[in-house]
Amino acid sequence: MMQSIKQQPFRAAVLLLVWGWLLFLVLAPNLLVLGASVMTRNPGTFISLPLNLDAYRQLFNPLYLEVFLHSLYMATMTTLACLLIGYPFAWALSRVEKRRQMLLIFLLIVPFWTNSLVRTYALKLILATNGLLNSALMSLGVIDEPLQLLYTEGAVIVGLVYLLLPFMILPLYSVFEDLRQDVLLASHDLGAGRFATFKNVIVPLTLPGVLAGVMLVLLPAMGLFFVPDILGGSRNLLVGNVIKNQFLDARNWPFGAAASIVLTVTMALLMFAHRLSKRRLGEEGA
Amino acid sequence: MTKTLLSLSGISKQFDGKTVLDELSLKIDDGEFITLLGPSGCGKTTLLRMMAGFELPDQGSVTLSGVDITQMPPETRPLNTVFQNYALFPHMSVFDNVAYGLKMEKRPKAEIRERVEEVLAMVQLEDFAGRKPHQLSGGQQQRVAIARAVVKRPKMLLLDEPLSALDYKLRRTMQVELKRLQRELGITFVFVTHDQEEALSMSDRIVVLKDGCIQQLGTPREVYERPANVFTARFVGQTNFFPGRVTRIEEGRITVDVFGLTRVLGKPSFRVAMNQSLHVLLRPEDIRVLAPDDNEGVAGKIVERNYKGSTLDSVIELEDGSQVMASEFFDEDDPTFDYSIGEPVRVSWVDGWEWLLAEESDEPLTDEEELAADDAEH
């Protein structure tokens, strides 16, 4: 009893910190964005009353709808690519010897130490018309003249995959780590071949990791505006570019805020799906 | 009479240069309950995994009903395994766990339902079909694991220390349950354990393993009463090793000097020579503790007494410092039957209850074996 009373101030401080953090740095900014999204654009003060839903209505403008859909398409492609690369990667990673594993994870994290803007520029040097890739392909005689790699949809997706792949691998690695070998053996033992085991046991048991990875890749992939800025040219915009332009160039805060809210809601829906899938596995109280 | 179901011949296996199984051969009869018993690292689990197909031998072959299945993958072997930690599918209900094997066989839905319900009734889990494994107790999960394996009507059930995660009481219950299941199903059970008590009480035959070699193969009674070597004697149950010296050899009999006592014993199956040293083995329950004025036995004093409910276990230190374990049943007619520490007594045994073993160039038990043997006693 005495112990817990003595610990009370510490406990209170920690709780205050956590709640304070959530309140001022998560809840408040989001409320501000939500508030801004339902206000009216004002060239002088950025936003002003009255409240209205014009900004949301504007989202359905075919022009923006197209940008949104194209952005969603590129983000989906990015996510799929990350999943296709990350799933086997994480699986293999979980199977190598423990000491090696740590080294590989370390290598996976090393790029984070370099600013992602710088890394995107590096990618630009590789993909450029007279960049590394084209020179290499030409000197190998695979192609006669440089390919147009830069400023394409593909370049944006490559850039996004490059930046976001670790976010797919890490949650997948964690579920593969938890995947018990004897459960897989049990599946074989009961007559399931490799494919049946993959389909009936491995996929359902790694699904929470897949969803976590998708959450960590899909949404940021719609927001990383500097990737299209550097690699994509004017045609391959992300929702992030729209939001950035609305705030910095067009000075239409309500519209930028509304676009941002749509992203947040999408995220929330994904998180909800993730929770459901975890509950199905009984990881949280059912 | 009995026909061989599974036969292993000349099985060898190495992991990272370490020999786990060494030219091991074993025949398992149809319908028997056979236990692989040994300390950790003796190769018993590897042997079981080889039968299941999870592990391939470096050398040797596995035949099932005369068919070579050495290279056959686990999914096509008509054997099923009950895993140590159950290995249930956490995302499936009890019903789906049990139905899994039948679904893989592509059985019709109605048949699956019927067979799953039948086997769930057998393990008394009819009412839990809709639960998820994490909503069950350890004992219930264990039953699901068994149900999941037997629903496929395998020729053989492989059980890898299936009771080790359960508490003592539940373990006893499950032992009885498993025996009952085996009788009802008539399936051959191969049971892996390091618990000698479990092995003795459940098995038709016991295979005692050490360092990838079979030490002894026999009925529980043979293994306990007539251990083939010092390892088996030490590993299975508690044993007093008395040093004996052969002083006379006659037709069918030898005279042995034990602690200065002269005993005429039956001639053992191994060769004996005059003045040869040998082990005279006596289980604690074979020891008679006599009054200090008795004219039989060796003198000693009580150094430890343990009340065990039905028996009184004591340790007697002899004059030469060696210790003797004795376990006596309570004599209901003798209310004073008990000892105090330090009490002088004499120790003897009934002729013919001893077992003789030649002295081996045997090293003492390694720490690990000691630990495993200790484990096995609890």
Image (cartoon, rainbow, N blue to C red):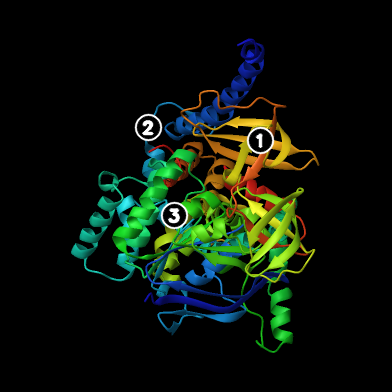
**Residue corresponding to mark 2:** A52
* Front-lying residue, A255 or B73: B73
- Mark 1 lies on a secondary structure that is loop
Give the mark toward the camera: 2 or 3.
Answer: 3
* Front-lying residue, B122 or A281: B122
Q: Amino acid at mark 2?
A: Asn
User: Gap in Å between the C-alphas at discs 1 and 3?
Assistant: 40 Å
**Residue corresponding to mark 1:** B294
User: Gap in Å between the C-alphas at discs 2 and 1?
Assistant: 109 Å
Residue in view at x 40 percent, y 26 percent? A50
Farthest left residue in view: B110
Is residue A214 at least partly visible in the picture?
Answer: no
Chain letter behind tag 2: A
The crowding category of the residue bearing disc 3, from other C-alpha atoms within 10 Å (few below 14, some 14 to 19, many at least 20), is: some
Residue A107's disc number: none
**Residue corresponding to mark 3:** B202
